[in-house]
Image (spheres, rainbow, N blue to C red):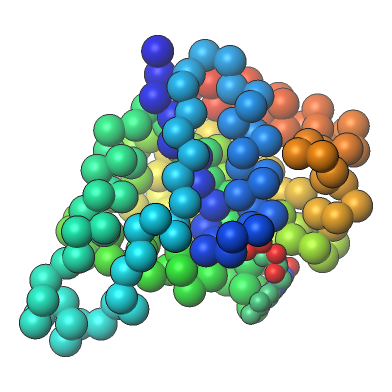
Amino acid sequence: MKNIIAFAGSNSKKSINKQLVTYASTLVEKGRVSILDLNDFELPIYGIDLENDKGIPKNAHKFLELIKASDGILLSLAEHNGAYTSAFKNIFDWMTRIESKIFANKPMLLMATSPGARGGASVLEIAQGRFPYHDANIKGVFSLPSFEKHFSENKITDQELDVQLKKLVKQFEDSL
Ligand SMILES: Cc1cc2nc3c(=O)[nH]c(=O)nc-3n(C[C@H](O)[C@H](O)[C@H](O)COP(=O)(O)O)c2cc1C
């Protein structure tokens, strides 16, 4: 049984990206998916002085261990001002102080959604450019634009987008 982790790059309790990644996890047939929440891995804002004084906090180690113990990653990034949210960037930065290759070549389905028509296209572009330096093995990329219009009752309501995501989840699973 494959062990997949799913999480959103957001610390919002009502995160639409968590809703999307949770839906994607229901489409997984082969594996067991654990849904993680950045709120359960609270961390101080990264700073070199803090690191020098106190070291790397336990929660950064814990999250990295969960990535490394997994067989694959479902990740949906929230977009703030065209980039990662502070919460995601913070845990990302802390983990890269433990080691650079944090994604450990695990197959990844990278997603984003936003209320706007671009569906997190800017943060997806940033992540696709950057994650490979951290040994990401991106198997597919999915953007859900206009979340309110296309998602309801815990699932995607637009058939074309739903079919697109289902294909990508299948591809992701086949790569595990
Ligand atoms: C500070 C801030 C900046 C934002 N910037 C963007 C943006 O650049 N592009 C976008 O599509 N949405 C932007 N939004 C709207 C977010 O996409 C929206 O809040 C969404 O719900 C965030 O995802 P989450 O619910 O998973 O946290 C921004 C929201 C905030 C609070």
List x then y, in percent, for residue 145: 81, 54
* Residue 153 point in image, percent of width and height: 82, 39
The quarter of the displayed image where residue 176 is located: top left
| Quadrant hosting ligand 1 | bottom right
Q: Is residue 60 left or right of residue 32?
A: left
Q: How many marks?
A: 0
In the figure, 103 relative to 146: above or below? above
Q: Is residue 33 above or below residue 151?
A: above
For residue 46, above or below residue 141: below
Residue 46: give x, y in percent of width and height. 29, 77
Residue drawn at point x = 50 percent, y = 46 percent: 7
Q: Quadrant of residue 164?
A: top right
Q: Is residue 53 visible?
A: yes
Residue projecting furthest to the bottom: 49
Residue 139: percent from left, percent from top: 53, 34
Q: Nearer the viewer, residue 38 or 118?
A: 38
> In front: 137, or 95?
95
Q: Residue 25: which quarter of the image?
A: top right
Q: Residue at x 48, y 28 (%)?
A: 33
Q: Quadrant of the N terminus?
A: top left
